[in-house]
Image (cartoon, helix red, strand yellow):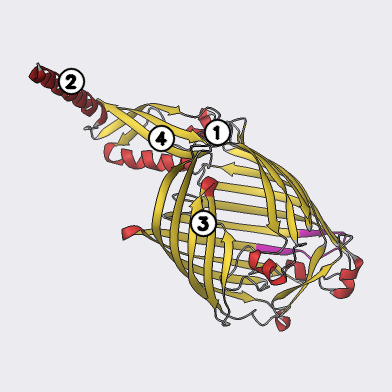
Amino acid sequence: MLLRRYLFCAAVLWCCCLTVANASLCTEPHVVVQTIDFTGNEVTKEFILTRELTFQPGDTIVTEDLEAQLEESRKRIYNLRLFHAVNYSYTCDNGLVQVTYQVKERVYLYPIPYFDFADRNFNAWLEKKDLSRLDYGFILTRRNFRGRNEDVRLRLQHGFNRRIELSYRVPNLGGNRNLGYEVGVADYRSHTINYNILNNRQYFYEEKESMPIRRTSAALALLHRQNVQRQSALRVAYYHEETADTIVHLNRDYFNTGLSNRNYIRLDLSHVFNRRNTFAYPLSGSYFDAGIGHAFFLNNTGTGFTTARAKYVQYVPLPRKFYYSVGGEAQVRLGNNFAVTDNVALGYRSLVRGYELYVVGGQHYGLFKQGLSKELFNIKGIHLKFIRNPKLNTVPLAVYLNTFTDAGYTIDNIYEARNPLTNRLLLGGGFGLHVVTFYDIVLRAEYTANREGNRGLYLNVGYPF
């Protein structure tokens, strides 16, 4: 009896293996994609997913390229940043391939309590140690609105800096669904204004009871989106900026006109080619971003200028879970009579690590960065049993040890006499710990040293380059 059962189980197992083998292994030199199915997309419309595929039903694919195309399409779908995970499976029967992608959707409606420091970064705030220089509020985001990868965002911020923002982004219109638009309005007011930069440090004017700076804007962007990796945008925005009259007396160069207000229109054209394996913390692939724009001032409230910028980064996986990144960024700004508030180079969005406490203004700059990371561990999902929602109860956690060197140079032909770090090679380096976790959050603690002999521990959010 036991032998009979054993032979029966073996026969069943052999038949099952034979069936799977015949259905899964593609022995023909070319295969035809017969069907493409998706599971798990309860909210997301199917056309949002099919737009990212490198193949469509009916396409003929070289068999040895099939896995590469399936994986490339998987990465594109994942980098929509709509899903916790994306996997695929396929079967092959007589040269016909049936593909299924399985996705695990995120939560798309979430109010996020907002708490931040009123300065450029944590360390700049820590210098002042002023608890009144805090911002708070909430950000209400509806991602993947209508299941069409549309975003609606409302930001209400109170505290030292007050801000109201509302934006709506629609990326998939037209017959090919490769056109879109984005609209937004914003109003910003603050108790303090950075009215000058001397010795590469910001100087602030503050009023406890009133707001010495106000900025209002409205913007419209036309989008051309080939896929999640290739996107272009033409953006037009109107700005109104107004300061307290005191700022004109403190620094006539703030707007460089002797006026306390200005109005201008910015026209920007940009293109992004993003081939990183993941957009949150990339380990392989490349990134290219370029743009050109012009500011047109109205009613003689300023002098127009043109800005061109470009950025390229390469990410290289190495053996034993080491990862190397190297890249550069540059800006060229052409015009005359630049205002202090427009003389922006390093220290804000772009910086040489180790100079977090400094602002290095200029019309032109170049920036070089390289880093070497070692993956210490990567847990795909920590299950939180006390949370029932499957979209929230699994937390990924990856930790990397990183060492880096940065270099930058700015060219300032207007305010260089006041700021010794301009027209000078800036060098910084150090090591840090990077933590990648829930919903693409990247936390960084980095110990750096720079050419000027400054050393310190800096806390930041987001991938460094």
Above or below, comparing residue 332 to residue 8 in the picture:
below
Q: Which residue is mark 4?
A: 55
Looking at marks 3 and 4 on the same chain, the residue that comes earlier in the sequence is marked by: 4
Which residue is pictured at 60% across the width and 73% down the height? 355
3D distance between C-alphas at marks 3 and 1: 24 Å
Q: Position of residue 292 (x, y in %)?
A: 64, 58
Eye-nearest disc, 4 or 2? 2
Q: Are marks 3 and 4 in contact (CB under 8 Å)?
A: no
Q: What's the residue type where badge 4 is placed?
A: Phe
Q: Label 1: few (<14), some or many (≥20) within 10 Å?
A: few
Which residue is pictured at 33% across the width and 31% down the height? 90
Q: Are marks 1 and 2 in contact (CB under 8 Å)?
A: no
The circle on residue 176 is 1
Image quarter (top left, top right, bottom left or bottom right) of the N terminus: top left
- What's the magenta region? 296-307
Q: Quadrant of residue 13?
A: top left
Which residue is pictured at 63% across the width and 62% down the height? 349
Magenta stretch: includes residue 400: no
Q: Which residue is mark 3?
A: 288
Eye-nearest disc, 2 or 3? 2
Magenta stretch: includes residue 300: yes
